[in-house]
Image (cartoon, coloured by chain):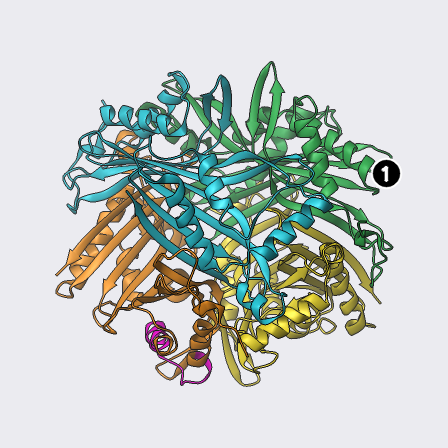
Chain colours: A yellow, B green, C orange, D cyan
């Protein structure tokens, strides 16, 4: 007969905010518009553990993930899959608050500005689903997109010459899943906040277009952050969402990076 | 004459929570008990920026760091240096809330348990200082120590055989700097929470001691987290501190990690 | 009219061994046994540049990748896709030696040892294709698998008690693509070299099986490395391949790792 | 009595090229010109193991490091310390070829170009010492410096407008330690190969100087690599060294990086 050491009382009785698994890589299939998509997210799952219980049954977390992945029909979105996994997990293990996070590379298409070639671009997506005591769900989706910044201060002081660099724009949207736009829309919100968006492929004419666009839109890292907030407000009015923006600029004239972070509530 | 583009009004007027620099590596000298110590922290400095100001004067951040490092007498602790840098920065740039974070490798000595050899061990330290509108300072110090966990559930079900793995214990203490213990004390609190602490050097007799100690102290990742909280409470009573503990176990029978996180207030 | 700065003579005339692109993430579709598979590899492509030419036409690299991905029918393996990209690239740009590398997470199934559940496991695969002056191709495939080691020295000196830890086994096979086994076979060669292989999911009975197996197969990191070489020799005799093995053990009684590396030629 | 499992014959008799320790962090004190300097390198030590021996005595590696660090007088360079550790290790353990590698952050001073402020800059240094069967030593030192590139092709096609980005220059020198220049000289060789070197601190006048310098020196990643080789040849003639250069440019108009690698022999 098995001994369930997890069910013992712990030596030190403290409530734990989160216990669970982290850095699990697994294989996911989504079905969207009749097409299958595969990805390999890094997964974190956690829930609270009361002070009277020594350990969580960690294998039930993996079991819940496995059963949703292999037994059920494939889902149409990562968020729906997360909802299903949390529901399954709540049947197997008692907790008040649970959460599941996927981090993965998301591929999308761009069209080069002049030569009109189709390119594949990749951005990092993090999607988190939370379940509370009343089985209500909240979602939190982040896209992390690579673009660039062109310094307006150097440009103003050097007859149009300036320093330019790669930058990252991050947009996090928290709220009801029906109110959060899809990844492509979120990426568009971030891309239009840069001096210019970037492309895997650029022929000479495309490069000229991008260079000209960069010089036409000099921005600080603070501007990038505010542009993300502003674009979000324009596109998402009336959706009752919390918006967090972060901008990181890999300064070409320094070895360090500069950052800006802001947060707004959209009614 | 220079154009101060930073002082313009921004296109999109949003308050920013944090603007500043990140991933700056610099060279620091501390003087403690008559001895000089050098280290190369990774530095983050940030402060709020009101909606009416387009950009922060980022160079003043670096200037404040440089002036403290090179012009002043060396400090005796990283935290005092952080206080001095924030004070200097507040003279140069207006803000309500400021923060500075150093992350660095901290070296300390252990004595091997049987052969009594002196070894050098390294842990990661993060120390953060915050300044508010009234020039009051709060400190937040984290040590991240490597040890191990031995599974009590597998041990109970397999006649003493079990799985064992490397684990990380993190302790974060937030409060008044005079109430936060030194790094060595914090490391001791974490090290005594593991199945066994670890050593760079172990001769065969030391290894036997460590192996025996591991089998005598089987713990879940949840136990590790609670042990850190419990040890903190025992050692730091009466100090009015906030304590956060995090435990990560690199499971030897899985490819993923398991985690536990808790938080207490010590009066 | 465009100026082709790349075609100028460089100031300093040195042959370059490799010029190209790195850290490109792209979206790939493979078709195998009638099924489509998607993955997002990190890509490096490089070739030699003679001393008389200032710069490579980097956009032609991306163009070659894009054309193979979007214009052609999908390939059935990453390696065939790499061959096609290098052939396309050689039509667009002159070079003697070219190479393309994909690094990606590869998902495969395991069956838990006692409860016979199906689990998804992930390993890192790196696959490199080289083309030489005579349009001959060589391939180099690496799998990096997570398992564990159990110390035989501690076990012999402590009545069966020992230290156990997560470990990584890497197998690289270099040769003709028709002689290199598929990823699953390579993973099997590495998994059977550990004290035990690891699983995402383990119910209590499975855990007991794995624990027992670990104690039955105590190995040093050197044994792990030699087991990979030995398993390779047994399974791949007669295939004329170069085999490299690397083992890394994340010691549970130390903060550092131990390693072993070996190399054999299989006729 | 202890059982020396390491001394057994292995099951699978293969010579191993390298066995040892990796990712050890330790605390080092150097004494140079009467001053003490501390740093925390990441250390790798390895040597060959013949097919008849099952395992290396790994603790002797740590013992050799500890004895040199704590028992002996401090050394004046990382390379001398490496020589002493390898000599000590060869007394404790039989092997033909041994190597030790330190990787660490190295701090050095710059003077800003116009305001003449002193700044601290950091670069990554890797230093490796090899000992062969005849107790002869070879050294291999790498500096990895951050600077920038300005695209000459975009500049030529867009009336002086172009894209600019952060870049890394790596210089590796292999040879006799007396012929290898010091880190500061190696850094200077790399810094003068960029469009401009970078500084932690730049006041507006300094920034203007750097911006102007960048536009005056547009270079491809291939130019950066060749400039490092060329500068090395100019400064190190007659020293009988092998020189490897690597350049990485974090393209501001793409999400990927571009690279160039070259190698020359200086007689």
Q: Position of residue C31 (x, y in %)?
A: 39, 80
Answer with left or right where residue C61 lies relative to residue C225.
right
Asked whether D203 or A198 is in front, the reply is D203
Give above or below for A163 relative to C219.
below
Tell me which residue sits at (29%, 56%) in the image: C171
Image quarter in which the N terminus of chain C is found: bottom right
The answer to which quarter of the image holds residue C253 is top left
The answer to which quarter of the image holds residue D8 is top left
SS of the residue under disc 1: loop
Tell me which residue sits at (75%, 62%) in the image: A243
Q: Which residues are magenta?
A: C69-87
Question: Mark 1 belongs to which subunit?
Answer: B
Answer with left or right where residue A154 lies relative to residue B53.
left
Asked whether A214 or C258 is in front, the reply is A214
Q: Which residue is mark 1?
A: B133
Asked whether C50 or C230 is in front, the reply is C50
Q: Is residue D71 magenta?
A: no
Label 1 Cα neighbours within 10 Å, binned few <14 / some 14-19 / many ≥20: few
Q: Position of residue C240 (x, y in %)?
A: 15, 64
Tell me which residue sits at (40%, 62%) in the image: C19
Give above or below for D91 relative to A26.
above
Image quarter in which the C terminus of chain C is found: bottom left
Tell me which residue sits at (37%, 80%) in the image: C75
Instruction: Label the magenta part by its dominant secondary structure.
Output: helix
Q: Position of residue A150 (x, y in %)?
A: 68, 60
């Amino acid at each position: 007969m098995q001994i369930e050491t997890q069910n013992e009382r712990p030596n030190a009785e403290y409530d734990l905010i989160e216990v669970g698994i982290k850095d699990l890589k697994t294989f996911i299939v989504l079905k969207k518009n009749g097409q299958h998509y595969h990805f390999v997210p890094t997964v974190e799952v956690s829930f609270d553990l009361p002070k009277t219980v020594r350990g969580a049954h960690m294998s039930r977390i993996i079991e819940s993930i496995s059963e949703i992945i292999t037994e059920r029909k494939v889902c149409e979105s990562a968020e729906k899959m997360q909802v299903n996994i949390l529901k399954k997990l709540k049947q197997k293990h008692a907790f008040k608050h649970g959460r599941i996070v996927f981090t993965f590379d998301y591929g999308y298409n761009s069209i080069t500005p002049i030569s009109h070639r189709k390119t594949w671009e990749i951005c990092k997506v993090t999607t988190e689903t939370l379940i509370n005591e009343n089985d209500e769900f909240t979602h939190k989706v982040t896209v992390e997109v690579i673009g660039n910044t062109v310094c307006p201060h150097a440009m103003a002081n050097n007859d149009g010459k300036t320093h330019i660099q790669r930058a990252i724009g991050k947009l996090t949207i928290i709220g009801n899943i029906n109110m959060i736009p899809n990844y492509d829309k979120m990426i568009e919100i971030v891309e239009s906040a840069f001096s210019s968006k970037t492309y895997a492929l650029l022929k000479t004419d495309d490069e000229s277009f991008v260079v000209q666009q960069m010089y036409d839109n000099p921005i600080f890292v603070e501007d990038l952050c505010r542009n993300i907030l502003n674009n979000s407000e324009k596109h998402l009015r009336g959706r009752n969402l919390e918006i967090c923006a972060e901008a990181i600029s890999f300064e070409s004239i320094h070895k360090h990076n500069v950052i800006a972070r802001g947060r707004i509530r959209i009614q």
